[in-house]
Amino acid sequence: MSELSIFFALLTVFVLAIFVGFEVISKVPTTLHTPLMSATNAIHGIVLVGAIIVTVKLLDPAHALATPLLTLITIVGVALGTINVVGGFAVTERMLQMFKKREPGKK
Amino acid sequence: MIAFVLLRLAEIAAIALFILGLNFLSSPATARFGNRLAAAGMLIAIVAALAPSHGVGWWAILIGVVIGTAVGLFSALKVKMTAMPQMVALFNGAGGGAAACVSTAQYLLWERAHNAAVPLDVLTDVSLVVSAIIGAVSAAGSVIAFLKLQELMTGRPVTYRGQQFVNGLVALAIAGLAAWVMITLGVEPTWAYGVMVALALVLGVMFVLPIGGADMPVVISLLNSFTGLAVAVTGFELRYNLLIIAGTLVGASGTMLTILMGKAMNRPLRNVLFGAFGASGGMEVAAAKGGQQNIRSVSVDDVAVMLAYAHQVIVVPGYGMAVAQAQHSVRELADQLEKRGVIVKYAIHPVAGRMPGHMNVLLAEANVPYNQLYDMEDINPEFARTDVALVIGANDVTNPAARNVASSPIYGMPILDVDKAANVVVLKRSMRSGFAGIENPLYEDPKTAMLFGDAKASVDGLVSAVKAL
């Protein structure tokens, strides 16, 4: 596939995802906006996958391209991505633990 | 072949789990399940990324993952519920930083492989520049938002003469360097890329500095969508659908939330970001007038009687409740009142607190059932039928000036109509004006009584006074 057709395939996915994003979010009530923000925050931690891919590419012994600086940058990338994923989901879980349904006035 | 098919299927499963997870987040009853679905999707995505690596670079990935898990888990489990907004900001910054790291590593890696003699392809070149810039702005901006909310630096807007001009200049310099890197397809001295990323970090700092603490919910939501976008663009760079879809979902949702909040405050986003709300004008006016005069201060016992013999009480929580950590005491007061047959409802303004839904989370922490919490549109008609509106540490969201004083900076912002209630009791630390620095005529209303002091101490006092009746 040529570069251009790859680009348009990716762009199509991007545009469709925008619509899905708006659609899914517009149903969430105000009460849940904080957990929602926190959960979506965890989901963009998917960048961790990108960090892993680049690290593997860098440290591939077949190319022997790694330098200390580059290795450090990728490790920092993986660490930051992991903070985003782990912290994001854990904090959301903690918030949602508190949303319990109870009949008003009853103990 | 089979491995390839399995990996692609795993990626599709991860995407489906993200979308389903967000879907389940639309109801409090299923939200937890939704969060876990999304987390499961993330786990699948990570395993699918690791599987084809044949253990290459395992030690580097392990170091990063161990450090990240330790830091992320520790801070997520240790943080107090009231500090939630800044924690979300920090995790968001980490994501933005990771996107910038990925792009920078990609760029340097390519440079090292080809000695900068071979041009990058257009798609990789453009997307790595864009994702590095947005990621860096988001990371630095999130750190400033964290510092402001954690009160490690002033929550007030930091402004100086010519600020917009300086910010514009920095943005222009970034755009110039970015264009250079893009047009030459990366075949230019590496310093251009380095300076570009450094300036993007500077811009992130300077962009959040002039925004006041009260507008932080909008900023965090916006930065969240920035990081989402940066991650989506990283997906273009790596030609990886999973990153594009997940990043875009977040970018779209963050944008949507930001717009909703702007609407709730009836202020265009431009005004929030560049208006330096409550910076100089409003505050100085309030100070010059020496505060408000005709206010009525009452004692805890007076308020206790008023509450105990009311038919319906509406609690209006604000940031003051969060600061004083008074949510548990508020719940206890509500329990006492309900025991006496008083109907207690909570009125939640969309921008009360420092994060959308901030009050909901705090009250949920104190076990207030969420069906007692009412949105602004639902509760406003109720105030006329209410005996006492109990305002706890909320200010600007109750300010009637938004309705009728055209010169007020918050004119036009929808507010909670607390002044329609038969009696208004305002719990407040002092007569200092709110974050926006605007006087509140509600306090001069003859039916308003002020109960000064720390919100938690006042509410605790009310609990024992009501018990004693």
Image: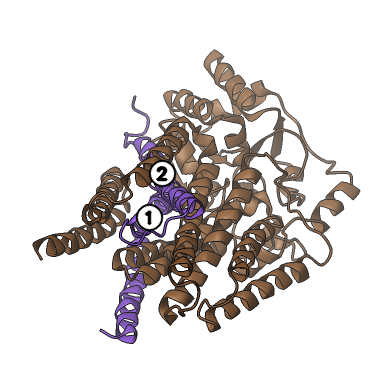
Chain colours: A purple, B brown
Residue that numbered label 1 is attached to: A55
Q: Nearer the viewer, residue B337 or B440?
A: B440
The x and y percentages for residue A7 are 34, 81
Q: How far apart are marks 2 and 1 (CA)?
A: 10 Å
Label 2 element class: helix
The x and y percentages for residue B421 are 59, 45
Number of marks in the rendered image: 2
Q: Do labels 2 and 1 share a chain?
A: no
**Quarter of the figure with residue B422:** top right
Q: Nearer the viewer, residue B76 or B123?
A: B123
Q: In which quarter of the image is the N terminus of chain B?
A: bottom left
Q: In this view, does B332 lie above or below B19?
A: above
Tell me the subunit letter for badge 2. Answer: B
Residue that numbered label 2 is attached to: B64
Label 1 element class: helix
The x and y percentages for residue A21 are 35, 66
- Count neighbours of disc 2 (C-alpha within 10 A) and say few if under 14, some if 14 to 19, many if 20 or more: many
- Count neighbours of disc 1 (C-alpha within 10 A) and say few if under 14, some if 14 to 19, many if 20 or more: many
**Which one is closest to the eye, mark 2 or mark 1?**
1
Q: Which of B130 and B85 is in front in this view?
A: B130
* B219 sits left or right of B171 in the view: left
Type of amino acid under label 2: Gly
Q: In this view, does A35 lie above or below B301?
A: below
Would you say the residues marked 2 and 1 are in contact, meaning their CB atoms lie under 8 Å apart?
yes
Residue furthest to the top: B468
The x and y percentages for residue B332 are 48, 24
Residue occupying the point 70% across, 24% down: B299
Judge whether residue B468 can be spotted in this image. Answer: yes
Residue occupying the point 71% across, 62% down: B404
Q: Is residue B335 above or below residue A52?
A: above
Q: Residue B277 — which label?
A: none
Type of amino acid under label 1: Thr
